[in-house]
Image (spheres, helix red, strand yellow):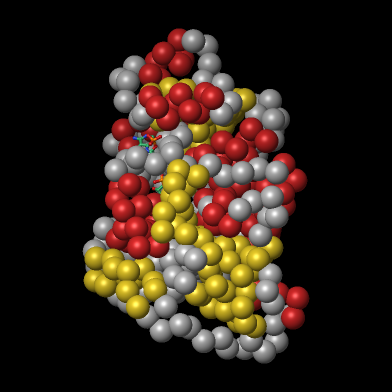
Amino acid sequence: MKALQVISTNRVELREVSKPEVNEGEVLVRLSAASLNRRDHWIREGKYPNIIPNTTLGSDGCGEVLEIGQGVPDEWLNKQVVINPNVGWGDNSNVQAATYQVLGMPTNGTLAEFIVVPHHRLAHKPTHLSNEQASALPLGGLTAFRAVFHHGKLQPNQHVLITGAGGGVSQMAFLWAKAHGAIVSVTSGSEKKLSKMLETGAAHAYNYHQEDWAREVSASGESFDLIIDSAGGAQFNSLIKLIKPGGRLVYYGATAGLPSKVDLYRMFWNQITLQGSTMGNDQEFLEMLSFVNQHQLVPMIDSIRPFDQVIKGLDRMKASQQFGKIVVSLT
Ligand SMILES: NC(=O)c1ccc[n+]([C@@H]2O[C@H](COP(=O)([O-])OP(=O)(O)OC[C@H]3O[C@@H](n4cnc5c(N)ncnc54)[C@H](OP(=O)(O)O)[C@@H]3O)[C@@H](O)[C@H]2O)c1
């Protein structure tokens, strides 16, 4: 079968590998679609810890269960499924175990024609979504769900700011927050993406490349109950200034690096919560899918490309050209 594998610390290649075999408690899934995450890009660039050569990349996948191992309920056979990318979250719903991993390094991931996973990683594919749309959900949808609801504690009608609106997780955070009845504004470094977000229902859209963007937001009287960020970097303090007293800043990444300082004075005086967040527990994964079904939500897709074009998809992500999830068709 074909699989996108890490060859050495910063080289990936689409190559022929053996089809995996099913053991007790496991299922073989023929993948129909997989989507890319910034994590795949970091691994490709050699900027991820503990990269193991000859591992198949990919954390998001959708497909059909072709074979089941001993002890797996028959009901899974021939079902259309999405795969929960958590590997060993553990018993504490508040935080993952020290041994926690994400599918697609060091375990073989979804950028392959077939994958074998334990049957408890399966969930039913939402029926209103195409295979490609469903493959966009797992990692980003879960990360956004925990950030918005568990840590963000979002309430209807609250004002939310989501940074880097072109990103996969950000857009799902946008969809989840809107569906919950919040008033959602966004930032992006691209005017085109900002226009698209306004068309999609953003209350306001700000260009983070404009030096005074945060000052202008403050001057307009706008402030936020919740800010969701994955960029970090030099603008982190500007975000802190935009939070209402008693509000929260939930962050799950640092794409733009670390801030050189954090305004602790403002934070303690305004009683602001700065909260890190990572993925989400297995229960939240099911809750996220149920939320998607309940509101008939459809993740935004940037592009769908054949498997032999997957490296071009990674190049597109590297250049931050995407608007939504970059999907690879595997059939
Ligand atoms: N902790 C976790 O569990 C977890 C889970 C998923 C992702 N992450 C991390 O979260 C980040 C986003 O992941 P992703 O998969 O959504 O990536 P992605 O789809 O590649 O999106 C990244 C987005 O970051 C935005 N960005 C870049 N520089 C920015 C800046 N200075 N200010 C604001 N936004 C900026 C860009 O938005 P525009 O194009 O709109 O400017 C870009 O589209 C990555 O760092 C990733 O490693 C962490």
What's the residue at 34%, 40% (across, down)? Answer: 321
Measured as percent of width and height from the top left, residue 256 is found at 32, 41
Q: Is residue 309 left or right of residue 225?
A: left
Measured as percent of width and height from the top left, residue 147 is found at 56, 44
Front in this rendered view, residue 229 or 133: 133
Up the image or down, 206 lies above or below 1; here it is: above
Specify whether residue 257 is in view: no
Residue 56 appears in which quarter of the rendering?
Answer: bottom left
Residue 17 appears in which quarter of the rendering?
Answer: bottom left
What's the residue at 43%, 66% (across, down)? Answer: 111
Specify whether residue 112 is in view: yes
Q: Is residue 128 left or right of residue 199?
A: right
Instruction: Check the picture and name the quadrant holding the N terminus.
Output: bottom left
Residue 29 appears in which quarter of the rendering?
Answer: bottom right
Q: Is residue 46 left or right of residue 161?
A: left
Front in this rendered view, residue 82 or 145: 82
Measured as percent of width and height from the top left, residue 26 is found at 60, 81
